Amino acid sequence: MIIAVNTRLLIQGKLEGIGWFARETLSRITRDHPEHQFLFIFDRPYAEEFIFSGNVTPIVLSPPTRHPILWYIWFEFQIPRILRKYKADLFFSPDGYLSLSTHIMQLAAIHDINFAHRPKDLPWLKAKYYNHYFPLFARKAKRIVTVSYFSKEDINRTYKIENEKIDVVYNGVNSMYTPTSDVEKQTTKDKYSGGKDYFLFIGSLHPRKNICGLLRAYDAFRTSVESDTKLLIVGESMFKTSDIELTYEGMRYKNDVVFTGRLGNEELHQVLGASLALTFVPFFEGFGIPVIEAMNAGVPVICSNTTSLPEVGGYAVLYVDPFAMSQIKDAMIRIYLEKDLRESLIGKGFLQKDKFSWDKTADLLWGSIQICANT
């Protein structure tokens, strides 16, 4: 079988959630199935680290997909041409974008449809594109994989796609996120927080992630408790960050908030391992990889009680309503004051995180590919 794959999000040093999903699953699938040929379709020069095995043929297909108009050109004109040229049997798209202009069977990984519920979080044109095309992609797909039962039910309910067509393929957790030593923790604190303890957020900076609510909660925490604990925010700005900037400027304790920007893998491992707790309180999440990364690193988690997150966190996290700043503040106080609570969450987290692995993810995804090929 010749399997063409949209690998445009495999960008060296810039892997986000979907990029990690693509990397971890495709590296295993291509290695474990040498009897099949894989066409990796990039939209810019690629890194050799993403050519995982000898049965992978890389193709660079312009134009780089940095804008909705370019998305349309790439998927509706360029992708069909390549699929015809190489006589592909299946097109797999880890980010859910499909081509409406080809008759080749297609498998879409639609991680979530947050844009259907929160379109104002996105630039206008992107929101219009997603909300016009993703319902069409969902209907066009031979099958759909998604990363939680919450997202499966959401796609079923919102797009009227039959449940039998949607497979749940949980994300895994990167094995590098392990507990760090006391010496490593102190070195990391010295580097990033002036030697002080800190709460940690990991993720892109945009409205859906509720950074404003976290900043307000941190200010309220510091006002309520005599503490020099800081707040580290790790991630790149995406769009619509003016509210974050305004909230930050109005904070009483803004000098104790550290924006690190994007960090490399080893830096992120150390920063996560040294944190007092992960504070991950988005309004909407299709899965929430940082939650299980924190569990794997032996770090307690404060987490939203909405969308997919209770499914991922199980009984191993401290839940809050992301719309209630006071609940986030109270959870931070409890984590700060209650050592037994922290240790209990860490222990439960070590059990919960074992439900998720990239090996399981790759096996389930390969199962969906086989169902597509055999029906």
Image (cartoon, rainbow, N blue to C red):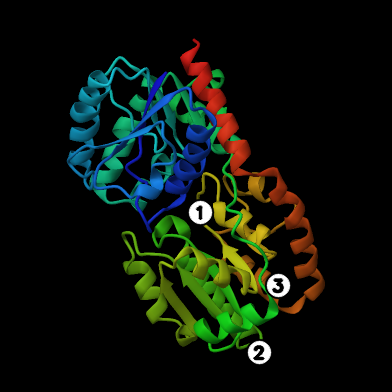
* Relative to 70, 83 lies left or right: right
Q: Earlier in the sequence, mark 1 or mark 3?
A: 1
- Which residue is painted at 73% across and 50% down in the image? 352
Asked whether the beta carbons under mark 1 and mark 3 sit within 8 Å of each other, the answer is no
Image quadrant in which you'd find residue 295? bottom right
Residue at the spot of label 2: 226
**Image location (x, y in percent) of residue 178:** 65, 62
- Which residue is painted at 59% across and 85% down in the image? 223
Q: Dot 3, crowdedness within 10 Å: few (<14), some or many (≥20)? A: many
**Image location (x, y in percent) of residue 144:** 47, 26
The one of 207 and 75 positioned closer to us in this rendering: 75
- Real-space Cα separation, disc 1 to disc 3, in angstroms: 21 Å
Asked whether the beta carbons under mark 2 and mark 3 sit within 8 Å of each other, the answer is no
Image quadrant in which you'd find residue 296? bottom right
Seen in the picture, residue 35 relative to 351 is either above or below; the reply is above
Closer mark to the observer between disc 2 and disc 3: 3
Q: Which of marks 2 and 3 is nearer the N terminus?
A: 2
From this viewpoint, is residue 194 visible? yes
Residue at the spot of label 1: 283
Tag 1: amino acid: Phe
